[in-house]
Image (cartoon, grey):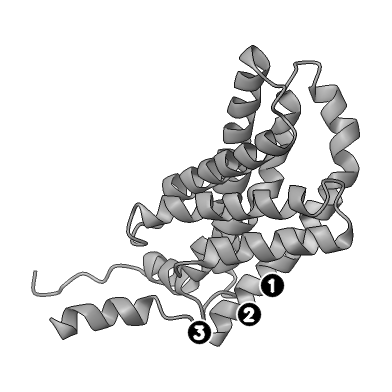
Amino acid sequence: MNQSVMPSRHRFRWSVADITVTAVIAVASGIVFWAIGFIYAPIGSVLDIVPGASDLLNGFYYIAGPLAMIIVRKPGAALFAEMVASVLEALLGSQWGGAGTVLPGLLQGLGAELAFALCAYGVWNMAVTALSGALSALGGFTASWMLYGMGKSGLVLTVSIVCNVLSGAVVAGVLMWVLYRGLAGTGALERLAGGRAAVKAAAPVVADPEA
């Protein structure tokens, strides 16, 4: 029994490299979150020709969790990355304020984490990453709706939810998977579980000469 438990424990054990890379992803994402704030209003006002469509921009706020998770592949990576990123965004001066930044970050991290937890942290592909982005979007939307959007209802609320989930799945899910694959292809992630998995998947299959 111990032999079957130990490999799983070792697989989920955090290394210094895991912590460092997750922190780097979080800091980079926090800067992205902060920068998006400067363009959100002008671009969002154009998108809101269809009320609620400005939420298509929100996918950029959900990138930290899914990206950290598929690279590091450790329980807690998504929550860690989203929380650090949101705190940094708040410290840099987010237009949403402290609570309006950190609370969504918490729920976004939990949502991103949930997708991989449902697969027992054992399935790593674009589909699960897209689900992670979508669930992160639901978490972030829930927090933002409680803080600012209680007046939304009916069709506007429906459009907001759909745009959030779609943006989360595509931007934080599919695009982050593509980014991960690109980084893994350079060899930059070889010390991390995601990098090792990519190398293994790309290795040619050697035929058994006796087959």
- Residue at x-position 56% and y-position 74%: 189
In the rendered image of this protein, does residue 21 appear above or below residue 31?
Answer: below
The residue labelled by disc 3 is 15
What type is the residue that disc 3 sits on?
Ser
The quarter of the image holding the N terminus is: bottom left
**Of the image marks 3 and 2, the number of the one nearer the N terminus:** 3
- State left or right for residue 6 relative to residue 142: left
Q: Which of the 4 quarters of the picture holds residue 137?
A: top right
What type is the residue that disc 2 sits on?
Thr
Where is residue 130 shown, x and y percent of the image?
Answer: 50, 44
Q: SS at mark 3?
A: loop
Q: Is residue 125 visible?
A: no
**Furthest residue in direction left, as rendered:** 210
Local crowd at mark 2 within 10 Å, few (<14), some, or many (≥20)? few
Local crowd at mark 3 within 10 Å, few (<14), some, or many (≥20)? few
Q: Report the front residue among 93 and 146.
A: 146
- State left or right for residue 96 relative to residue 73: right
What type is the residue that disc 1 sits on?
Val
Q: CA distance from mark 1 to mark 3?
A: 14 Å
Q: CA distance from mark 1 to mark 2?
A: 6 Å
- State left or right for residue 5 relative to residue 119: left
Label disc, if present, on residue 20 of the rendered structure? 2
Q: Report the front residue among 185 and 38.
A: 38
How many badges with numbers are in the image? Answer: 3
Local crowd at mark 1 within 10 Å, few (<14), some, or many (≥20)? some
Q: Which of the 4 quarters of the picture holds residue 179?
A: bottom right
Q: Is residue 46 visible?
A: yes
- Residue at x-position 91% and y-position 32%: 42
Q: Looking at the image, do the residues carrying marks 1 and 2 touch, with CB atoms under 8 Å apart?
A: yes
The residue labelled by disc 1 is 24
